[in-house]
Amino acid sequence: MSLDAPVLEDDVFDDEQPEDLKEPIPMLADGWGSYGDYRLVGNGEVTNENCGKYATLRGCLRVDLHNKTSLDSVNYAGKVFVRRIRFSCGKPSCPICYKSGWAVRQAGRIEARLAEASKRFGQVEHIVASVPVKDYGLDLKPLRRKVTKILKGLGVVGGCLIFHGFRYNLKKGWYWSPHFHVLGFILGGYRRCRRCKGGDCYACDGFQGKLYKCYWETGYIVRILEKRITVFGTAWYQLNHSSIKKNVMRFHVATWFGNCSYRKMKVTIETRKDVCPICQHDLVGIRYFGGKRLNLNGERDSFEDYEEEGCPVFAERVWRSYG
């Protein structure tokens, strides 16, 4: 292994690590997502019997606007767009709700805040900061402060830190290896290094050169991942295998630092709108009065016939207030 360029580990599946991370590796006592005070999200208990169960329907009844043909040659004339809404407790520990409930909501907030910040700081970059073995015993607060200081020293002016306590290896399974996924902004951007055709990074004053110097000075491995497709999708995926602290009611998996911190940037986050994929109108609460049995345990979204035997079988749900 070359001493000029440390091997940087993969996101989750990690078959080859830098020498200083190979031993010792604290293995998990129960073999699955739990070590000390921390555990993987979705690795707790279901505390509400309604988690994941069908709650209501939302959809679009503007069938007059649905006479359109999609790219896959499907025409939606006379079809109602139906979205099945399920109950979610919103807890990151819940094995049923952590992906479709908690992670979706958190990713939406991260996307909205970074969208506002990108107007001032440019393109959002996906950065990974891996902790060396010598700091595995640090509590999370001082560890976050140390990682934030290192990132700022590299020119990362702000962003969101998502804590990961574990990595997965096909041979060893899950093991303790704290690191942070960062969605943030680099002073001057990463365009210069992204377009570089190769060379002696250690001798370069670009961002990639700073990463190598940081490794030899601190032991922390910081790297830039490939250009992300969407901020929401990246945040949602990283939240899906992030880590939480046991017995803490409101543990913050995602935290903000630098110019994106709550003290320095005020953002009013608008609720993500549910719209029809055909006509783009807002979805409304609907009820079904037909004779067939809707597959409420199937796909989340579907298109259903507005009429059965010549009679409308969908209507807008009317919410009544009593008082």
Image (tube, rainbow, N blue to C red):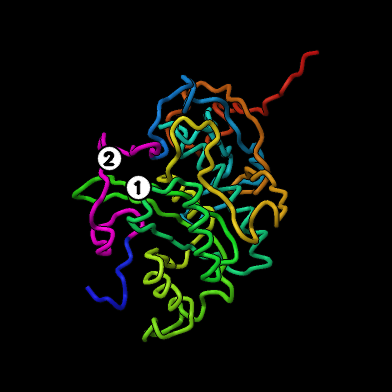
Between discs 2 and 1, the one toward the N terminus: 2
Local crowd size for mark 2, using a 10 Å CA cut-off: few (<14), some (14–19), many (≥20): some
Q: Position of residue 129 (x, y in %)?
A: 43, 60
Give the image location of residue 24, x and y in percent: 24, 52
Residue 52: where, in percent of width, then height? 47, 28
Q: Which residue is mark 2?
A: 28
Query: Which part of the image, by quadrant, shows the N terminus?
Result: bottom left
Characterize the local packing of mark 1: few (<14), some (14-19) or many (20 or more) Cα atoms within 10 angstroms.
Answer: many
Q: Residue at x 59, y 73 (%)?
A: 187
Residues rendered magenta in the picture: 10-39
Q: Residue, x 36% and y 50% (percent of image)? A: 136
The answer to whether marks 2 and 1 mark residues whose Cβ atoms lie closer than 8 Å is yes
Q: For residue 133, which numbered disc appears in the image?
A: none
Q: Quadrant of residue 14?
A: bottom left
Q: Which residue is mark 1?
A: 166
Q: Is residue 141 above or below residue 187?
A: above
Residue beneath the point at 55% across and 27% down: 308
Amino acid type, mark 1: Phe
Whether residue 311 appears in this view of the structure is no
Q: Residue at x 25, y 37 (%)?
A: 31
Does the magenta run of residues contain 21?
A: yes
Which residue sits furthest left?
A: 171
Q: Main secondary structure of the magenta part?
A: loop
For residue 173, side relative to residue 127 (left or right): left
Q: Amino acid at mark 2?
A: Leu
Whole-number angstrom distance, CA of label 2 to CA of label 1: 9 Å
